[in-house]
Amino acid sequence: MLLPLSVGLPVRLDAHTLESAGGPVSITLSDSARGEVERCRAFVDRCLSDDRAIYGSTTGFGPLVTFAGRETTVDQCDNVLQHLTAGQGPDLPPSLVRAAVLARVWSLSQGRSGVSLTVIDALCAMLRTTFAPAVPSLGSVGASGDLVPFAHTAQALRGHGHAYVDGQRMPAAAALEAAGLDPMPLDGRDALALVNGTSLTTAAAALAWTSVHRSLRTAAALTALLADVLGSTPAFLAPQLLAAYGHPGAVTAGAYLSALLRDVRPTGDRPLQEPYSIRCSPQLLGAAWASVDHAGSVIHDDLNGVSDNPLFFPDDELVAHGGNFFGQPCAFAADALSAVAAQVGNLAERQLDLLVDPRRNNGLPPMLSPDPGVQHGLQGVQLVTTAIVVDMRRRAASPASFQSVPTNLHNQDVVPFGTQAALNALDLAGSLRLLHGSLALGLRQSVHVGGRRPTAPACVQLMEALADTLAPVDRDRPLDGDVRAAADLLDTPGLLDGLVEGDR
């Protein structure tokens, strides 16, 4: 069943739209865009008939550019794809691969790559099904595009290798048949245009951005709920205080937290100053929001640019050879997302630690156990949050965006490793969701073992949603599923919408 996404290309692509490609989507190319793609392809054909040198069409690839390529366009297709089909490691998630294909369609549809219109139509046909190429996770350095991952993608669309249909992995030829798709015909220019762009990097970064962006709002909502459950005063959110800090992000985060805590009734029993995990939350979350907003603007530009080489400009009679496949912008942006995810993860882990500690949680039982010693409450969950947050710190502490290692006979003598940066950010975004699920479970349990019920209307509404989803922990039981259920709930469209007016 097609999701309600039917657009005429080219339009502006955003990260939220890209996320929809995990399931079948209907994509159409506008008449004007089809005309531009065909005009550009005709220009390429004319250049080739005039014996103009065009990288990858008349030459070998990479450092072998000084050698002639194969004689026919069909052989030139194999010339680029076969040697690049060398990826290793576990498959990437099918939803990510499909998002990468959608991002590639957007780039190719700009009419600068000289690709055949049949290629774009074939990719759009694929997106209307559940077909997803099986793509290994290791192989791209993100410098001449995501060469190896898209070689596997193109091969699967030709019926070679493996693919998924309805989540089931099978030989690609059988997958094409099951999805009702024909093998995609390619020539040399088509094949190079498919692989010579950073669309996997951009797609992974975009999906990481959407997840982290949602998690920041979740972090604010859970922070407000924690403050309410503990009976904290919202004095740390004074507008005058945050304005004096000088950072607009902190003012915005503080206003959002204040709205969540509107009409809260402090107990008056808490210390004059709360721990930093509550008191400094607007400063931390404000900085995180600013960084994520900047990363989002970079990723959005990348999604809507042309990532390929060479590019063709018929009006100028220009074949431009350059480096528009160099994934540095998203590499920096993805590493920034990883840093944000790790620090917001630190915040969630410390907030859960505060909640389970009887010395700081208003005397609630240790580990929020209903019968300490006999039952262990969230003890196991807290151990796992410690493991998760240290894994996040370790992985965020070594940014990929400057791990340049020359390769390809020094043709690629500086590389951004944007693909690794983006895949890492996507993984850390998933870990942050689990930390928030753990904290949400703790907040729900705190009320069950005697903590006060929230008083701010927005916090009451959030607690009711958590209580409807999560059963109280009366006796020790496996809680891994509860954590995931809480994380999924917090990502439910509409749950946090409308808790406050002007929700971002």
Image (spheres, helix red, strand yellow):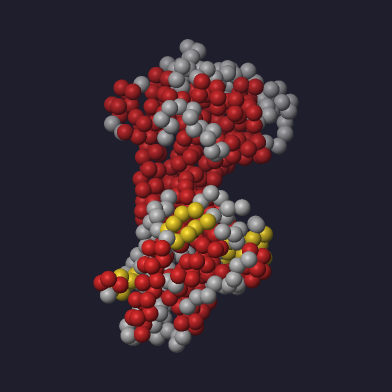
Foreground of the two, 344 or 14: 14
Considering every residue shown, the one lying at the far front of the view is 31
x, y percentage for residue 198?
Answer: 43, 62
Q: Quadrant of residue 144?
A: bottom left
Task: Please identify the quadrant where the C terminus is shown.
Answer: top left
Point 73% across, 28% down: residue: 475
Foreground of the two, 383 or 196: 196
Foreground of the two, 445 or 199: 199
Q: Is residue 66 visible?
A: no
Point 40% across, 86% down: residue: 68
Decide: is 35 above or below 457: below
Foreground of the two, 191 or 111: 111
x, y percentage for residue 224?
Answer: 48, 26
Decide: is 158 above or below 482: below
Q: Is residue 206 visible?
A: yes
In this rendering, position of residue 182 left or right of residue 59: right
Decide: is 256 above or below 389: above
